[in-house]
Image (cartoon, rainbow, N blue to C red):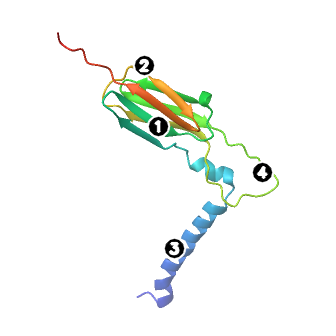
């Protein structure tokens, strides 16, 4: 039968191991930690009677760094964001903004008219209006 010390040592060791891992995650150099957390912009994709509309939050992303394509019935949004660090005389206490490559692929239930897509990019928000392909009406 295990003695009282052995019985209680496992949970205590586990607790200290969890604390060590947490501390390592929090205090490791930011360059390493940031590489583990990819950036995916938030998007809204909704449908109207005539079109699909995508709105994506892309703060700090330049228009030329965003690429959108239609691949079959999939909408592919990809690009990258570079974070410029203007602080070199201090140290960060919190650093939550991520940078790097991103890619989002979303399935559209119907085909879109690629030639008629409207693109707007204002104040860090990308808005795509993708008209649906009209079915030919039988005469």
> CB of mark 1 within 8 Å of CB of mark 2?
no
Q: Looking at the image, is mark 1 or mark 4 nearer the viewer?
A: 1
Alpha carbons under labels 4 and 2: distance apart:
44 Å
Compare residues 135 and 104 and report the one nearer the observer. Answer: 135
- What is the crowding at mark 3: few (fewer than 14 residues within 10 Å), some, or many (at least 20)? few
Distance of mark 4 from mark 3, alpha carbons? Answer: 38 Å
Are dots 4 and 3 in contact, CB under 8 Å? no
Q: At which x and y percent is residue 84?
A: 71, 43
Image quadrant where one finds the C terminus:
top left
User: Do the numbered discs 1 and 4 sit on residues whose CB atoms are within 8 Å?
Assistant: no
User: Counting residues from the N terminus, which is met first, the one under dot 3 or under dot 2?
Assistant: 3
Which residue carries the number 2 mark? 116
x and y percentages locating residue 126 in the rendered image: 52, 34
Q: In this view, does 10 lie above or below 67?
A: below
- Decide: few, some or many residues near mark 2? Use Cα within 10 Å; few <14, some 14-19, many ≥20: few
Q: Is residue 42 above or below residue 29?
A: above
Identify the residue under disc 3.
Answer: 14
Q: What is the spatial separation of the Cα atoms under label 1 and label 4, in whole angstroms?
A: 32 Å
Q: Nearer the viewer, mark 4 or mark 2?
A: 2
Q: Name the residue under label 1.
A: 55
Disc 4 on helix, strand or loop?
loop
Residue found 55% across the figure and 45% down from its top? 38
CA separation in Å, label 3 and label 2: 59 Å
Which mark sits nearer the N-terminus, 1 or 4?
1
Image quadrant occupied by the N terminus:
bottom left
At horizontal 32% and vertical 20% (from top left) the residue drawn is 133
Q: Nearer the viewer, mark 3 or mark 2?
A: 2
Counting residues from the start of the chain, the first of labels 4 and 2 encountered is 4
């Amino acid at each position: 039968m295990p003695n009282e010390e052995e019985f209680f040592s496992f949970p205590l060791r586990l607790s200290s191991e969890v604390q060590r891992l947490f501390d390592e995650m929090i205090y490791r150099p930011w360059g390493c930690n940031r590489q583990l957390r990819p950036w995916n912009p938030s998007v809204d994709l909704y449908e109207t009677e005539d079109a699909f509309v995508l709105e994506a939050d892309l703060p700090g992303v330049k228009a030329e760094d965003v690429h959108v394509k239609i691949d079959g019935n999939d909408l592919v949004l990809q690009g990258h964001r570079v974070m410029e660090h203007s602080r070199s005389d201090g140290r960060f206490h919190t650093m939550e903004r991520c940078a790097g490559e991103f890619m989002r692929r979303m399935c559209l239930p119907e085909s879109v008219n690629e030639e008629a897509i409207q693109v707007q990019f204002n104040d860090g928000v990308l808005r795509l209006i993708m008209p649906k392909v009209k079915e030919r009406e039988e005469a």
